[in-house]
Amino acid sequence: MPDAPSPVPVLVIGGYLGSGKTTLVNHLLRSTSERLMVLVNDFGQSVIDAALVEATDGDVLQLAGGCVCCQIGDDLAGALQRAVEEHPDRLVIETSGVAQPAAVATSVAMFPGLAMDAVVVLADAERIRQSLADRYVGDLVTAQLRQADVVLLNRTDLVADPADALAAVGAVARGPVIPCMNGEVPPEVLTSVGHEASVEAALHDAGDLFWSRTLPAAGSPAEVMARLAAIPGVVRAKGFVQLPSGEWRLLQVVGARVTSTPWSGPTPPAAEVVVIALRPLQPS
């Protein structure tokens, strides 16, 4: 009887909205020789670099180097079973920005044929102190950091005093904190850290904190931004804008930071932007 295949190692990537999770995933895809399977919540919200996409087939993106990216949807167990059957060299799961990555890690640890590598949580050096102190999301961000086996303090090149942001994260995180830019760390740093189950939990259900909707995004990025500016409490927006010339652009909004970049990948299904905003806090 042939030996059973070894468990597929799993890297769970978490972090608050706009912290750079997809950027890290793209970096891993570019910098590893492994055949990766990536699970994401939605292609429209978690955009794999167009240069890495070779073909699109329904809920699957065929990527360079034999890698593949699949949508999780509402069926995490089904997505995990698919990973066991296809048996990549490593599975990478990008969680939602309002999710607790420890919950996903627990599901992985209990799933036959999979083995946890580590929970990696990203923190935005520009916003981490503000996020930790925020009356709406501070508990959630704190829980995410405490659930991490390793924290990547991202965008340290955009702050005048990276040591201050490092101190803020270090006071909360239970694991090591690694400063970085654009999520660029050697993959082996993440896969060698090891996993320790976390019992930390946020005090609020993320569903009570946020609402999300999809807005049409025809017109210029400036016109789309004007529509977004009329929505109170926007913390994250991401999607595709089609200019009057027919050109497609990827629009991303993280707090006060706005980027609009040309898109040369597969034609998006629609000109639309997914918006995540805070619900008004009810008086106690």
Image (cartoon, helix red, strand yellow):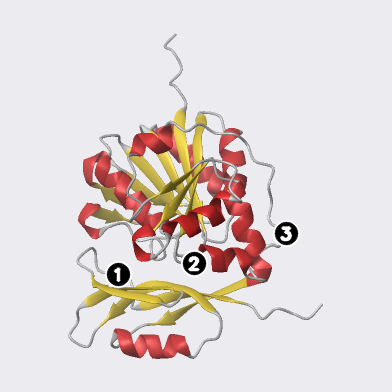
- Describe the element under mark 3 as helix, strand or loop: loop
Q: In the shown orientation, is residue 126 left or right of residue 261?
A: right
Residue bearing the label numbered 3: 203
Q: Which mark is residue 199?
A: none
Residue type, numbered disc 1? Pro
* Crowd class of label 2 (few under 14; some 14 to 19; many from 20; radius 10 Å): some
Given residues 33 and 139, the one toward you in this image is 139
| Residue 160: image location, x then y, percent | 39, 65
- Describe the element under mark 1 as helix, strand or loop: loop
Do the numbered discs 3 and 2 sit on residues whose CB atoms are within 8 Å?
A: no
| Residue 143: image location, x then y, percent | 63, 53
Label 1, label 2: how many angstroms apart (C-alpha)? 30 Å
Q: Residue at x 45, y 61 (%)?
A: 125
Residue type, numbered disc 2? Arg
Task: State whether residue 100 appears in this view.
Answer: no
Measured along the vertical axis of the image, is residue 229 above or below residue 268?
below
Q: Which mark is residue 127?
A: 2
Q: Earlier in the sequence, mark 3 or mark 2?
A: 2
